[in-house]
Amino acid sequence: MDTSSAFKGTVIVKHIFICLIAFVMLYPVLWMLGSSFKPANQIFTEIWFWPKEWNFQNYVSGWSGFQGSSFARFLVNSSLVSAGAVLGNVITCSMAAYAFARLNFRFKAVCFALMLMTIMLPLHVTLIPRYILFNNLGWVNTFAPLIAPKWVATDGFFIFLTVQFIRGLPRELDEAATIDGCGSVQIFWRIIIPLALPALITTMIFTFMWTWDDFFSQLIFLSDVTKYTVPLGLRLFLDSSSQSDWGPMFAMSVLSLVPCFILFITLQKYFVEGIATSGLKG
Amino acid sequence: MSTELLAVKRRQSKTQRRRLGARYNQNGVALLFLAPWLIGLVCLTLGPMAASLYYSFTDYSILESSRWIGADNFVTMFTADPLFTQSLKVTFIFVFVSVPLKLMFALAVALLLNKGIRGLGIYRTVYYIPTLLGGSVAIAMLWRKMLGGDGLLNQLLAMTGIHAPDWVSNPKYSLYSIVLLSVWQFGSSMIIFLSGLKQVPPEYYDASSVDGAGKIGQFLHITLPVLSPVIFFNVIMQTITAFQSFTQAFIISNGSGGPVNSTLMYSLYLYKKGFSFFQMGYASAMAWILVLLIGIFTLLVFGSSKYWVHYEDGGK
């Protein structure tokens, strides 16, 4: 009796400890969220995140944007780029994955090794020639350099992830379909795609998140403010150093995090499985 | 009867042929499925790799045509470019401080959450939030403001009477503010550790406590060895990512790598060389040095793995 209540005690202490760490860790995010509703003078003087009164002025002035481009423009641009990237990755990576997982062809081992190599390769090595190529095509300062690479399956990581998943599907299904007269294209479309849906969803989620948060390539390829995406638009707040801009900056920062957050909350299962089974970097 | 049998037989041999065909003669259809990937491989990976290798031996800049200068770029880097050496130093400190700290933190939290605790799902979600959001420009800007002179942290410290420096604009601490931001995002490593910990057979612990092993002994002799493949994987992935880190240093120093180049990460310097000064030959040479560094590191970790990574099946 005594030992069990002592055990309960340690469990409760442990829960309190875990919650405390979590609170400290999340405090910066909570503080940003709270500050986005505070007038400028309170952001500096109040340490507690909860605003005394709720003020939406920061959102209004942040939304107005920079140099005639409202924040809505940045959100639309980011959505376009992300949609293009997600669609491209999910189609072309799953096609390549099917070939690697199920078809036999010459040079398969070499191709697979090359694909694995592209996963490890730092993007810097191809960056400058790609820039020159896209510049010659007249694509710089358009969304094409951000979307086109996804339509030619350059994200080897997602191919690998989907290959692993398809290999786990029973081959008998393919064979049964072959007996029923299905060709490879039909097997891919009618059997593999529906069954590999979890892998495809993981691909879509992470492609979306990485494109939405991507700063490096967007910084390099987009130069006109009307073409700016959310990360580039947010960065403009840094150039104005006046403290009165903190509020609007936090407001738009919060807004920029909402899509990933909603995605995470609704599709959590796929996040955890994706990370745990394939070690997706965060 | 016999005709039926014949028909069945004919059908069987037809499927057999089809099966055999399916096994050996799919080059055409494979080409169809691989076409986008092949185009990408040639036009956006292998071609550009060859081109950047060539550029690294030239003084190419997008403004004028290139001239072959042999190994000059590489010689300059290591003998006459103090900023290059600085960027290497900054990157090495960042990688070798942030990755071990991040993994230790991830493992500690995973162990804390592991023992069949109630509400694991919720805790896991909460601890993953920094990783989910942390790569964004928004969080990097928050960090810059939070650790700045009159930011949240110093307001807190001022309450306890400590007058702290501006963590972001003091060259002594600026890099460590980025290290902190990176360690804060330990969520994916934690999730990988949690799934690794599930693989530890509980009998191991039971047997060892019968033998009188303490908690620390169990951790050292059971948990760590069983987790070693997962640690190995995490070390490689996190280090490769850390070598290339860019956004956080860029935002926190507002693109300068400052103060006094204390946050001049390798990627940031490469970006400045290639896209601010348009020394694209030099930037290409830097990219190849980065590949080399990552390659050497990966080989070292792989080489060392036989001494510390234990596989359940004996590594077969």
Image (tube, rainbow, N blue to C red):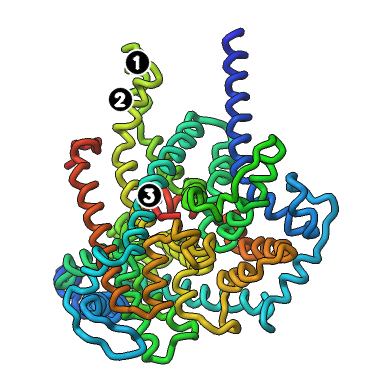
What whole-number distance in Å separates the C-alpha atoms at marks 3 and 2? 30 Å
Q: Give the quarter of the figure containing the N terminus of chain A.
A: top right
Label whose residue precedes the other's in the sequence (3 or 2): 3
Task: Say which of A264 and A140 sits in front.
Answer: A140
Name, please, the residue furthest toward the top.
Answer: A2
Above/below status of B153 relative to A62 = above
Residue at 45%, 40% in the rendered image: B106
Residue A171 lies, in percent from the top left, at: 28, 59
Residue at 32%, 54% in the rendered image: A168
Label 2 packing within 10 angstroms: few (<14), some (14-19), many (20+): some
Q: Which residue is mark 2?
A: B221
Residue A189 lies, in percent from the top left, at: 38, 72
Task: Give the structural element (helix, strand or loop) at label 2.
Answer: helix
Amino acid tagged 3: Ile
Q: Which residue is mark 1?
A: B213
What whole-number distance in Å separates the C-alpha atoms at marks 3 and 1? 37 Å
Label 1 packing within 10 angstroms: few (<14), some (14-19), many (20+): some
| Marks 1 and 2 on same chain | yes
Task: Say which of B255 and B78 sits in front.
Answer: B78
Residue A158 lies, in percent from the top left, at: 37, 64
Q: Is mark 1 in CB contact (under 8 Å) with mark 2?
A: yes
Q: Is residue A18 visible?
A: yes
| Marks 3 and 1 on same chain | yes
Chain assignment, label 1: B
What whole-number distance in Å separates the C-alpha atoms at marks 1 and 2? 9 Å
